[in-house]
Image: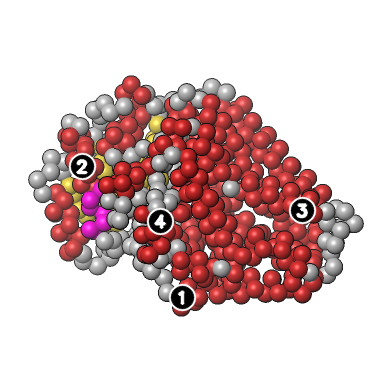
Amino acid sequence: MEHIGLRRAGFVGLCLAVALALLGLLWRALAPGGMTVWEWLILAAYLGTLPWSAISAANALLGFGLLMGARDPVAAVVPQLDRAREGALPGIAAALLVCIRHEDMAAVTPPLARLLDGLAAAGAADRFALWVLSDTPEAAPEEEAAVAALAAGRAIPVHYRRRSQNTGFKAGNVMDWCDRHAAGMEAFLCLDADSAMSARAVLRLVSCLEADPRLAIIQQLIVGRPAQAPFPRLFQFGMRAGMRAWATGQGWWQGDEGPYWGHNALIRIAPFRAHARLEPLPDGSHILSHDQVEAVRLHAAGWKIRCLPEEDGSQEGNPPAMPDYLRRDERWAAGNMQYFTLLRLPGLTPMGRWQLWQAVLLFVGAPLWLLLLLAATGNVLSGGGAVTPPGALAAVMAASWFCYFAPKLLGYLQVLLQPAEARRYGGRARFVLGALAEIAFTTLFEPASVLNKAFFLLLLPFGPRTGWAAQKRADRGIGWGDALRLLWPHTALGLAVGAALASVSWTALAWAVPVLAGLWLAVPLCVATASPRLGRWMRVQELCAIPEEMPEMRKNPAG
């Protein structure tokens, strides 16, 4: 892409401007009256959190500008996209790979059936084959039966293969398929068990891959599938707004060295086999977060990877409740921490190393936020902060909150400013209610989520080696006892910090309430956001409904 160097320089400059502005606001709050030891510690911890805040704000600002100003924002960041060729029949043969492990096949096969039927109806049946790749270690007759039922009477071939030895987890399964079964195929579409893609979206990816012979991966933006439970409804409503702004902005400056998120992506087989093979780490463990490592190795070999920031036709399931989300975050954290070792790999491009660092930054900020909270508490207990200007403190807290959540906040603003987008959500009034509900949820949930990541990372060097277990995807209620067993440390820390601050000053406690309230209410929030009754009420009220859900909800509002 022309001027990619200038774009990247502009992004770095924007990040520096955001970081310096935040740092200046914090200095105005801390400097009056001189700096205590605790305040120097606050400054040091805050400095460590600035890279992620700056990246979030810069990507969001760039993405928002493109979404509001470009005639076709998607085509503006992905030159391989040719709107005139969308839906054209593919000239290459591609496999559809679905990776499963101890999955409920009744939930896995319906989206696959719709995809197969859509491709056949488009006249592309002879260009695709479906492979269900199982990593379920023991014999799984229910998987075989479900795949056989899926294959019956279909024009597109359907195959099932199960490994009893799960070497390399999902990445090993996919590479093993490439080595043994990819003959005659030029590309494969990588799908997770909870993926749902439309035929139109798949054909669009194929047309992009065919438009550029050096394109190795074209990654579709992924949004949440319609959800019944309160937690995923709230989570994916905000995630969708945030990812749209983030991915559009990031795609503009990363160009041909984009990310790979592991699924809902079309991959060219030859370069993937040649360059994305993952050997064990020096300690003998396998790479857990494989996707971005595969991407940076393809970058290093001169191949292109693009993210198509198009929402239409590409979905995934989200964790049904807080415990499942926190466990997933821990798996991702364990995988991303392995990147410290991989950063030393020779031959990576500067952008490849940046992307590994960015994946690390997603998690390492959590212990720093915990340190900042404890240092601020220590400062109050020792008598520091008495001359802190309230206006300066409010400014740094508000600016930090905005930058941290800038992608979703600007994504919300985009929808409100574009009438056609707002109509897809049932109108501005309904969208605003959903956004306010999600912001309230996030404000309460994020402190517990960050603290959970901090606890996990601090204990990771002393804990057992983490694997890649099967995920819980089915909606279910959470009992008070289960929530308390999971979240009592978060609640206890929140109560202890609150009591310490209250012993000195109710004003100090009031300043901390935006953070501490999420810890105090972590258990009831966990129970409430898994409640089937609350989920039914939200569905009837169309609260946090996504565009794909709206027509179905109006036909059958009670679900």
The residue that label 2 is drawn on is 116
The magenta span reads 105-111
How many residues crowd mark 4 within 10 Å: few (<14), some (14–19), many (20+)?
some
Q: Residues within 10 Å of mark 3 (few under 14, many from 20)?
A: some
Mark 3 and 4 residues: CB-CB less than 8 Å, in contact? no
- The image quadrant that residue 324 belongs to is bottom left
Amino acid tagged 2: Leu
Horizontal arrangement in the rendering, residue 297 relative to residue 403 (left or right) = left
Q: CA distance from mark 2 to mark 4?
A: 32 Å
Disc 3 residue type? Leu
Q: Earlier in the sequence, mark 3 or mark 2?
A: 2
Q: Which residue is mark 3?
A: 393
Q: For numbered disc 1, what is the local secondary structure?
A: helix
Give the number of the disc on residue 480. Answer: 1
- Give the image location of residue 505, x and y in percent: 79, 69
Q: Estimate the spatial distance between the alpha carbons at disc 3 and disc 4, rounded to whole Å.
A: 36 Å
User: Which secondary structure, mark 2?
Assistant: helix
Q: Position of residue 534 (x, y in %)?
A: 41, 62
Q: Which mark lies nearer to you, 3 or 2?
A: 3
Residue name at image x 17 percent, y 57 percent: 146
Which picture quadrant has residue 529?
Answer: bottom left
In 3D space, how far apart are the residues under numbered discs 1 and 4 (Cα atoms)? 21 Å
From the image, state whether disc 2 or disc 4 is nearer to you.
4
Q: Which mark is residue 538?
A: 4
Q: Are marks 2 and 4 in contact (CB under 8 Å)?
A: no
